[in-house]
């Protein structure tokens, strides 16, 4: 079978779904590899590296698409790309199952076996395939670096001939995968760090990173390791206490999300107004609307002297390592269905069944099917 990948044409996307290292590994599993010329250019990987690893390089994307039994992607395919895919072929990547119904219908109608990495069950066995986790790690890391960059303060405490500098106070809101990496990164830079989450079980994880758990007296543990939505009263109380606390913070990194929904608005305009001038908010949830009311996705704005950064696609900023991890995740997933050089889709496997968006002309994911059809 032929496993293929093409250039990611979305603006602001530097990552690739297939690296030379994974090319070699897939060859080892008996696959043929085919990539579009220049595929890794934006992650600084040359065509020669793919060739040396055993891939064929085609000049144009359509030459790749037509031969692909399995297409590996980072960004969801465009409608034109779906038309170019062979009927019955497999696609694996981010497929944005919660939005963009037209794409999902197109995948269904073309009888593509589409596996959406956003839908992968987050079980222990799936950890090595979990792109949400691997990419969130890069996002959390970069978010803190942006905060440090924009802030007019040092993160660490310094004792110098020009006086003593107090460490910056950093608050990370949402202590999932991105948030925990943000906390770890801010700690390494020497800041005084606090983490906050509605899931109380993360307290221990935050503390193990040398940070403090900010207790606002509200718990929202949901099912499957995710947060549930808070009630109105719970939210009001959380917000009142948070607003008070923010008056003392230098840099806030927000990462709070509820899967498949717009990001919860946690930091209101009036909270921002109460903050010290010169403070910084980096809103990692900008992609899904933002955790701060004043966030403008893709922009940096200032309000009452507070800088609010709404970065999009942070993992792409660390395209080299993010691609390494992403490609490794996809390889581990593909290994479930690539058996002795043959493609075998075993729908008894919970990871294959759980992440399948469309197959054989049907939408397989129940919630998506209900919405789209
Ligand atoms: P996510 O990106 O969906 O959310 C980020 C964080 O925001 C979560 O910790 C969530 O609790 C928090 N949050 C939501 N609403 C909030 C609010 N109003 N205020 C404050 N915080 C809020 O989550 P994620 O990082 O993708 O993963 C969530 C959790 O799932 C992980 O922390 C982990 O425990 C679990 N997980 C398990 C596996 C596995 O076992 N394979 C893999 C990845 C994640």
Image (tube, rainbow, N blue to C red):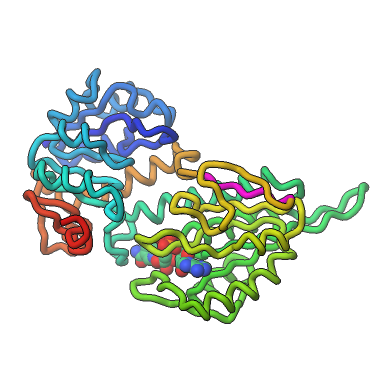
Q: Quadrant of residue 24?
A: top left
- Rendered location of residue 47, percent (x, y): 33, 22
Let me know if residue 176 appears in the view: no
Count of numbered tags: 0
Quick one: 272 or 284, which is closer to the camera?
A: 272
Asked if the stretch drawn in magenta spans residue 306, the answer is yes
- Rendered location of residue 371, percent (x, y): 22, 59
- Rendered location of residue 140, percent (x, y): 52, 53
Quadrant for ligand 1? bottom left
- Rendered location of residue 86, percent (x, y): 10, 35
Quick one: 260 or 150, which is closer to the camera?
A: 260
Quick one: 30 or 332, which is closer to the camera?
A: 332
Q: Residue at x 50, y 51 (%)?
A: 286
Q: Residue at x 18, y 63 (%)?
A: 366
Left or right of 9 on screen, residue 267: right
328 is higher (above) or lower (below) than 124:
above
Asked if the stretch drawn in magenta spans residue 15, the answer is no
Q: Residue at x 27, y 59 (%)?
A: 120
Let me know if residue 119 appears in the view: yes
Magenta residues, start to end? 305-311
| Quadrant in which the C terminus is drawn | bottom left
181 is higher (above) or lower (below) than 104:
below
| Quadrant in which the N terminus is drawn | top left
């Amino acid at each position: 079978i032929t496993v293929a990948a093409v250039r990611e044409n979305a603006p602001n996307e530097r990552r690739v779904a297939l690296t030379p290292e994974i090319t070699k590994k897939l060859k080892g599993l008996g696959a043929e590899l085919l990539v579009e010329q220049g595929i890794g250019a934006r992650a600084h990987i040359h065509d020669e590296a793919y060739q040396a690893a055993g891939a064929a390089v085609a000049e144009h994307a359509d030459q790749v698409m037509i031969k692909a039994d399995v297409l590996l992607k980072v960004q969801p395919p465009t409608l034109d790309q779906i038309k170019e895919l062979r009927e019955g072929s497999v696609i694996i990547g981010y497929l944005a199952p919660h939005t963009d119904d037209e794409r999902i219908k197109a995948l269904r109608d073309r009888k593509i076996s589409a596996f959406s990495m956003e839908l992968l069950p987050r079980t222990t066995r799936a950890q090595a395939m979990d792109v949400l986790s691997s990419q969130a790690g890069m996002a959390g890391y970069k978010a803190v670096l942006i905060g440090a960059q924009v802030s007019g303060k040092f993160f660490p405490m310094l004792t110098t001939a020009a006086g003593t500098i107090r460490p910056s106070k950093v608050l990370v809101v949402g202590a999932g995968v991105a948030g925990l990496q943000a906390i770890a990164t801010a700690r390494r830079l020497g800041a005084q760090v606090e983490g906050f989450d509605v899931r109380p079980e993360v307290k221990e994880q935050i503390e193990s990173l040398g940070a403090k758990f900010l207790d606002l007296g509200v718990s929202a543990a949901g099912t499957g390791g995710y947060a549930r939505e808070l009630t109105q009263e719970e939210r009001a109380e959380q917000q009142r206490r948070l607003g008070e606390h923010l008056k003392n913070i230098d840099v806030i990194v927000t990462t709070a999300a509820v899967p498949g929904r717009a990001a919860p608005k946690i930091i209101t305009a009036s909270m921002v107004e109460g903050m010290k001038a010169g403070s910084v908010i980096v809103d990692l949830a900008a992609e899904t609307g933002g955790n701060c009311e004043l966030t403008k996705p893709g922009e940096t704005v200032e309000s009452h002297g507070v800088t609010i950064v709404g970065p999009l696609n942070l993992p792409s900023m660390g395209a080299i390592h993010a691609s390494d991890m992403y490609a490794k995740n996809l390889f581990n997933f593909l290994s479930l269905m690539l058996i002795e050089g043959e493609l075998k889709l075993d729908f008894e496997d919970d990871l294959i069944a759980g992440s399948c968006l469309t197959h054989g002309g049907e939408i397989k994911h129940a919630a998506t099917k209900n919405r789209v059809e």
